[in-house]
Image (spheres, rainbow, N blue to C red):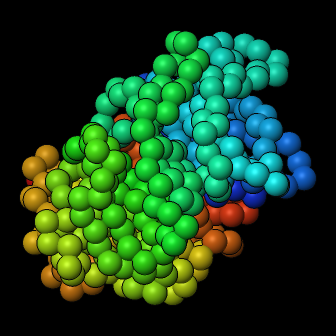
Amino acid sequence: MQGGSSGIGYGLKYQARCISDVKADTDHTSFITGTLSLKEENEVHLIRVSSGGTELICEGLFSHPNEIWDLASCPFDQRIFSTVYSTGESYGAAIWQIPELYGELNSPQLERITSLDAHVGKIKCILWWPSGRHDKLISIDEETLFLWSLDCSKKTAQVQSKESVGMLHNLSGGAWDPHDVNAVAATYESAIQVWDLRTMKKTNSIERGHVRNIDYNPKKKHILVTAEDESGINIWDLRKPKVPIQELPGHTHWTWAVKCNPEYDRLILSAGTDSNVNLWLASSSSSDDITSESLVDSPTQRLNPLLNSYNDYEDSVYGLAWSVREPWIFASLSYDGRVVVETVKPFLSRK
């Protein structure tokens, strides 16, 4: 099914690549995003969906000193988030806190809790464990995976352990297993490798080239989804890593991002440099039955896993985020700074 957009939009002043669901905000459906301007002072926008669901409201606007290449909201504190940033000459990473009464301040300033300053190479991402309160963080640069102990009250982050993959490899990103706090998957130029954080040793691998993005299925153990340049989207069972259990067509150009729904374990979002966001329905053979709500699953849709294509964009779409609070809502971000929030409720049906 091809469709335009019935979503609600919000415009950033500058170009942008990353957006995150504010999972710890249980009162509102909100997202946080940051800009990527080389010459101007960059911004972090805290955006809330209005109570009627008809508009996006800027809840907070904060200056950020550098280009933001990665941004992630803390899963257990709605005022804390991480950024990976570039000064133009080097990369850095930091943990930030939004001031408590930011709505009452004229020009609220972010507080830098701590910097993750052990990196030498180009930093790719910071990972929070997605399944609850945890005092550890993961950061990944081109050559090294770091495990940090974070103490926000003392404003410290200490390297607990690290492992280098060497000059022959080039790390590009990763995902932390929501079902196993000791497992993280990291992407290379030619493979995905799963690491045990207790030993910092590799425990599993998928031989696959040009993987842009990965995400674990938060509702089903052992399931990993990959976004790939040439092969579209693949769904893997890590117990049988030789071949994917399902292949999806992906995008007409590079598939850049992929996100599994936090509640409906067969729904997958993808975004690409073809300026589209696609909503996919994974086959039931690779997923448990949904108990609380079922998906509209006609014979036609079983043959065509593409439920909808959202094409209300004029630039590459790099950022995707499902809402945990309202899992039928997602936000997307195109490089020109356009945020669009959509609902997938038409593709859900009550039993």
Q: Which residue is drawn at 34% across and 26% down?
A: 133
Q: Nearer the viewer, residue 33 or 293?
A: 33
Question: In the rendered image, is residue 280 in sight?
Answer: yes
- Residue plotted at (45% across, 44% down): 162
Total numbered labels: 0
Q: Where is residue 330 in the image (x, y as percent from the top left)?
A: 45, 52
State the quadrant of the N terminus. bottom left
* Residue 148 located left or right of residue 237: right
Q: Which residue is drawn at 56% across and 54% down?
A: 141
Residue, far right:
39
- Measured as percent of width and height from the top left, residue 276 is found at 54, 74
Q: Is residue 55 visible?
A: no
In screen coordinates, is 93 left or right of 241?
Answer: right
234 in relation to 340, above or below: below
Q: Residue 48, relative to residue 283: is it above or below?
A: above
Res 226 quadrant in image: bottom left
